[in-house]
Structure formats: structure tokens, C-alpha cells
Image (cartoon, helix red, strand yellow):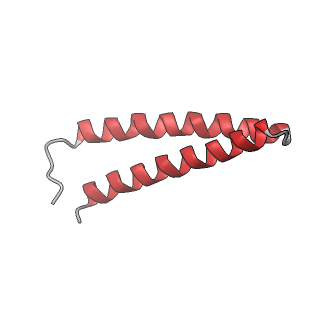
């Protein structure tokens, strides 16, 4: 596995983990949890968007390299 392929895999896994954690925090906030859960949910959503933008930027920057 090339470094490019591993990097893309890692960004995808990190994005999914961030979305899952943010969803859990949002669910806890809607069930009457402390206000900190709302901040965590919003922060996770923001970080997930940043990861997606970074992933797209990374793919465009290294599109000339193969995945092998």
C-alpha cells in the first residue's frame, strides 16, 4: 500500500469517526445532556467538514501519483 493510499484511507476513517462522535454528542445533547455535548457536536461537524476539504485538496494535489 502506497503512502498516498494509506493517507486517503486514514482521512476517510478519521472523517467517519468524527461524524460518528459528533452524532453521538448531538444525540446526547438532544436527550438533555450538559451543554458541553452541543459544543462537541458542533466542533465535530466543523472538523469533519475540514477533513473533507483537506481530503479533496490532497487528492487534487497528488492526482499525478498512482495508488500503487
Q: Position of residue 22 (x, y in %)?
A: 63, 43
Q: Quadrant of residue 35?
A: top right
User: Considering depth in this image, is 28 or 35 the residue closer to the camera?
Assistant: 28
Locate residue 36: give its quadrant: top right
Q: Is residue 65 above or below residue 39?
A: below
30 relative to 13, above or below:
above
> Who is closer to the viewer here, 8 or 22?
22
Which quarter of the rendering shows the C terminus?
bottom left
Image point (36%, 41%), residue name: 55
Query: Which residue lies at the image location 67% right of the left edge and 38% below the top edge?
Result: 41
- Residue visible at 62% across and 49% down? 21
Residue 16: image x %, image y %?
A: 48, 49
* Quadrant hosting residue 13: bottom left
On the image, the x and y values in percent for residue 67 come to 18, 55
Q: Residue at x 61, y 40 (%)?
A: 44
Picture layout, residue 4 above or below residue 22: below
On the picture, is 49 further left or further right than 25? left
Quadrant in which the N terminus appears: bottom left
Residue 58 lies left or right of residue 29; in this view the side is left
Amino acid at each position: 500500500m502506497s503512502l498516498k493510499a494509506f493517507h486517503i484511507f486514514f482521512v476517510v476513517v478519521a472523517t467517519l469517526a468524527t461524524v460518528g462522535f459528533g452524532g453521538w454528542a448531538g444525540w446526547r445533547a438532544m436527550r438533555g445532556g450538559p451543554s458541553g455535548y452541543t459544543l462537541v457536536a458542533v466542533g465535530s461537524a466543523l472538523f469533519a467538514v475540514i477533513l473533507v476539504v483537506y481530503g479533496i485538496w490532497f487528492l487534487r494535489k497528488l492526482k499525478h501519483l498512482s495508488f500503487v
